[in-house]
Amino acid sequence: MTNNRQAALSMAKLARLGQTQSEASQADQLAQDFDRIVSYMAILNELDTTNIEPMYSPMVDPLGPRDDEPRPSQPQKSEAILGQAPETVGRFFSVPRIF
C-alpha cells in the first residue's frame, strides 16, 4: 500500500471518528496538515523530559486556592443575573426538561 493510500485511509478514518465529512479536494490538504502534526509530535518526543515534573496546566496560580468558607449571598447580584434569564421560578432558573 502506498503512502498516499495510507494517508487517504487515515483521513477517512479520522473523518468517520470525528463524524465529519470532507470534500475530496480537501483530502490532500488535510493529509498534509495531519502529516505536519505527526512530524511535530515526533520532534517533541525526542526531548529529554526526565527531570521535568508533569503538569496539568502550564499556568501557575500565584494566589493559590482560597479557603472554602461560607459567605453571605449578594441578593442584588442574584437579582441582576436572574433578570437576564429567559424564565425563572422564584429565585431559580427555569430550564426545559430534556428527557
Image: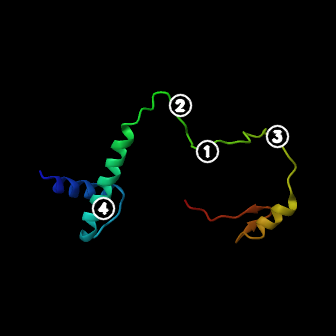
Marks 3 and 2, the one that precedes in the sequence: 2
Determine the residue positioned at 28% across, 68% down: 26
Q: Of discs 4 and 1, which sits in the foreground?
A: 1
Residue with the mark numbered 3: 69
Residue with the mark numbered 2: 53
What's the amino acid at mark 1? Met
Gap in Å between the C-alphas at discs 4 and 1?
31 Å
Judging from the image, what secondary structure is the residue with disc 3 in? loop
What colour-coding does the image apply?
A: rainbow
**Whether label 2 touches label 4, CB < 8 Å:** no
Alpha-carbon neighbours of circle 1 within 10 Å: few (<14), some, or many (≥20)? Answer: few
Marks 2 and 1, the one that precedes in the sequence: 2
Judging from the image, what secondary structure is the residue with disc 2 in? loop
Marks 3 and 1, the one that precedes in the sequence: 1
Q: How many marks?
A: 4
Determine the residue positioned at 55% across, 39% down: 56
Marks 4 and 1, the one that precedes in the sequence: 4
Q: Residue furthest top?
A: 51
Is 36 situated above or below 87?
above
Residue with the mark numbered 1: 59
Alpha-carbon neighbours of circle 3 within 10 Å: few (<14), some, or many (≥20)? Answer: few
What's the amino acid at mark 4? Leu
Marks 4 and 3, the one that precedes in the sequence: 4
Q: Quadrant of residue 44?
A: top left
What's the amino acid at mark 3? Glu
Q: Quadrant of residue 92?
A: bottom right
Gap in Å between the C-alphas at discs 3 and 1?
25 Å
Marks 2 and 4, the one that precedes in the sequence: 4
Q: Which mark is residue 30?
A: 4
